[in-house]
Image (cartoon, rainbow, N blue to C red):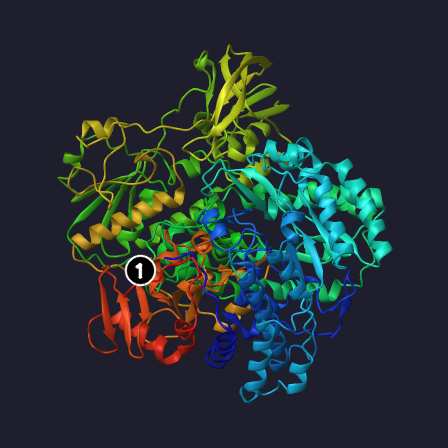
Amino acid sequence: MSEFMRKIPFEQLMNWCREEYKKDETIFGVHKEKFYFSKSGKTMKNVFGEDITTPVGPAAGPQSQLAQNIIASYLTGARFMEIKTVQEIDGKGIQDAVPRPCIFAEDECYNQEWSTELTVQQAFDEYVKAYVAIHALAKELGISDKKDFAYNMSVGYNLEDIKKEKTDTYINNLNDASNTPAFKDSVQWLKDNLDKFDNLTEEDIDAISPVVCNTVTISTLHGCPADEIESIASYMLTEKNMDTFVKMNPTLLGIDRAREIANKLNFDYISFSETNFGLDLKFDQAVEMVGRLLELAEEKGRVFGVKITNTCPVDTLRNELPNDEMYMSGRSLYPLSVATALLISEPFGGKLPISYSGGADAFKLADLLNLGFQPITVATTILKPGGYSRFKQLAEISEETMFDYKGVDVEALKKYFDELLNTWENNKLYREKVGSRKTDSKLPLVDCFKAPCKDGGCPIEQQIPEYLKLVADGNYDEAMKVIANDNTAPTILGQICAHHCQEHCTRVDYEKTLQIRDIKLIAADNAQDAFVKNIKPADIKSDKKVAVIGAGAGGIAVASYLRRNGVDVTVFEKLAKPYGIISHVIPEFRISDEQINRDFAIAEAQGVNFKFNTEVTENYSELKKDYDYVVVATGAWKAGNAPVKEGAEKTTDALDFLWKVRMEGGADLGKRVAVVGAGDVAMDCTRTAAKQDGVEEVVLIYRRTESYMPATQEEVNEVKEEGHKIMELTQPVSYDGKVLKCEAMELGAFDASGRKSISGTGEFSEYEFDTVIGATGAKVDTSAFEANGLNLDDRGRVQLLPTNESSVENVYVVGDCKAGPSTIVRAMGDAKKVAIDILTKEGLDNDFEKFSAPLDDQDIYARKAFLDPVKEGKEEGTRCLQCDHICEVCAEVCPNRANVAFNIDGYENLHQIVHIDGMCNECGNCGVFCPHADNPYKDKMTIFWTLNDFVDSTNKGFLRISEDTYKVRMENGNVVDHKIGDGKITEDMENFLTTLVNDYAFMWDPTDHVTLDEWETPVQA
């Protein structure tokens, strides 16, 4: 794998566009349906007086570095191109300085790149090639008959370097490229190849202006002195006679104000750089400087403004990227950017032009434009799934909103900022504590598409995209069949499932995860009763019998799976009714007996034998005299650790309390109640305690902060919505039955759990509570395991095979009794494994069926790259992207278009993925979003353009070394010289090579035309 990006010559660039469009109706992976065509035909005058169709585009960064990036931006609707910054240090100097990977955009984005990784001359050539290509493609594709976009150059980082020949020539040539080889050769190629175009004319080519760009945004390094910034801007306004913007950063706010804003929105884990905040431009300096530059610009007949924001430097504390410092953008930068814009706008009454970039996306764009910010440039949103195609929605929104520049509405901006701070969607926790969506599966070379919601997310592998489609169509009966295929408790899981699936939904990286659990409940409410009526007990197909100990969710699930497949099963339960914790402990306001019984009816109808009020006291060996298999599903009912070190006997265990309320009608708690803990059980205790007679106040006490609570965010939100007090950073120490003594805690560094460590401050406080409920986790009673000789590990957990079989043959363990409290659906996942293993041992087929409810391909593509808020009812299912049918996330998120989806026959997936090494700089973005555990840029089949790159890589793939011979690195790492059909390589690699050579020749064409950089030593074959 080589990080060197190879520059595609203009001829090969245009042939690639033309041939790919002819073959697949895509250009650099952008589908024709995602091309933006102005509906109104309107243009607007931006702050520089340029006529453009939309005021949106890529910020100077990864999406504006190579020609193909800029082309992809234009096609999808970008019309203001901030081309990537150039500086004196370029090429190898920058490449050596940038650590890899250099982008981490899991939620908010961090990066460790700054200016172009090309030489300044190479950057110029890329920008000009794209500029000329856009003119030709716009006319050929019917997008625009005239230039409707603008470039804005970015240069840095000090005046001395900017004045040097390298950067000075760059600036001059962008102002007039007429005598440069890049411009002349590109234009001439178009004229020489007019016969290849249907709509492009010689007049169109002659109309291409050599004035590529005559506006500039000044980029300075953090710590750049105010007088240096002003001298650069003055130079541009006077000596270069260019409209000039200066990038300004949230460091203007001061570190205390920035910290306050971030903390309010739960971005409290972000560590701002004290050094950079100390050295950067101060607000008073900025106001004075801007005032002088506005006067100078007016005097010279130019435009001056500021770009909000450049970046915000933060410390690397969680190994996001391989360096001590990184630059932040996206969601967490958004409130800081708006605050900075407000701060710098007020002194000038809104007359200071502001170019805005800082967390903008389709949901924020209209508001930002209406405030008077323009242009609006983005980076993070188009690094997410959907990629460049997200520009189409941005362009369509801006077309409805845009107006000629007229200044910033400061009063509206004040109101907007206040609302922003109190809008839940802007809070870090709106993502519901979801970190990475990646799963544990290895990334295969072929057929890699997967829906991570069901494959890696759901423990019982429910066929989620299928039933979402069916529910959205109103086909509830069929949806119920799909759900019940894998799920033995559709209503329970539709009501209170921990919904691990939603944590892996691709929509997490769009706007909000699909509300999968709610959709399941819609199907159950509409079709489960009829489904149960149609159940007929299966014939018994084996003389073997199974005993299940425990009628909780896991026990009933394994019994149901086995019985419906023809196995005789008896469930022993010491309680009087089914579903254990669910029916005896979880509050009724979360799930009712009626809902629970609806699910129990499934197992009853299937013919499962239940023996309630029957505790199994004999050894498993005795039980196995009558039963061939024993499945233990007894849960975790043992009291957890006490919430205090002293006075534990005076506290109340959470399960005891919740049992008393659900089974005995209530509990006498007094007036003031403390609940210690932060999991879902603690939230249940808090809400339940508040409903008891005589209770006046309930306080939830947690030793960390809300961001680190293990409870699902929706459960925490319900506690907050009911108005219950939460005491954070508080550790109970002792309780005497009346006074709870607590120590104040403080957060430290991140620990192995991914949460911040805590330590005591030595500051103690006392609070009066009538009842203290400990909700810090239940434990497993392992006495039965010990008595039966099951192997336990050094933590007292039963040791199991992957099938959940214990050290005693044919004795299995499922659910919470394995290792402590987990989730209902994970217990059912255990049950499914056990059932399949038992059926396999008995030579019986299982009835787990694969369903299909596909969307039309074009409908899926229409949903992609479109931010779509959560919908009501069954319509929510229409947000599903059917990722197992069409994934292509790695292709969407690649800034350089280095991952390509292509058509090939003979495989399960609609498309396969090939990686183009010469277009990749190892930014790592595709690895962040790939649902598998691996990295597409390292682990997918790869086309190489140079021998140097092939040798420098371990990727499986191909290098063309002559007209019909290819150097191939095979799956086992061996390298062979291969001619198509000679049988030296595997069938998959042969299929890929043959298809790519015959149908996608344009991907190979750069092989004979790209060049090594001047500092590279050619590798000998």
- Quarter of image, res 197: bottom right
Residue name at image x 47 percent, y 37 percent: 318
Q: In front: 195, or 255?
A: 195
Residue 722 visible to the viewer: no
Outermost residue to the top: 736
State left or right for residue 207 relative to residue 270. Answer: right
Q: Which residue is drawn at 39% across and 24% down?
A: 639
For residue 798, say whether it is visible. Answer: yes
- Amino acid type, mark 1: Val
Q: Position of residue 974 (x, y in %)?
A: 22, 61
Spot occupied by residue 873 in the image (x, y as percentages of width and height): 58, 57
Q: Which residue lies furthest to the front in this view?
A: 165
Quadrant that contains the N terminus: bottom left
Query: With 896 as the anchor, is 425 left or right in this view?
Result: right
Q: Is residue 776 above or below residue 990?
A: above
For numbered disc 1, what is the local secondary structure? helix
Residue in the foreground of this view, choosing between 876 and 762: 762
Bin the neighbour count of mark 1 within 10 Å (Cα to Cα): few under 14, some 14-19, many 20 and up. Answer: some
| Quarter residue 813 falls in | top left
Choose between 934 and 422: the one closer to the eye: 934
Q: From this view, report whether residue 341 is shown above or below residue 41.
A: above
Classify residue 241 as left or right of residue 336.
right
Residue labelled with disc 1: 951
The quadrant the C terminus occupies is: bottom left
In the displayed structure, does residue 457 sit left or right of residue 196? left
User: Could you say where residue 328 lies in the image, as x and y percent from the top left?
Assistant: 58, 44
Q: Which residue lies furthest to the left in this view?
A: 625
The total number of labels drawn is: 1
Percent position (x, y) of residue 419?
73, 44
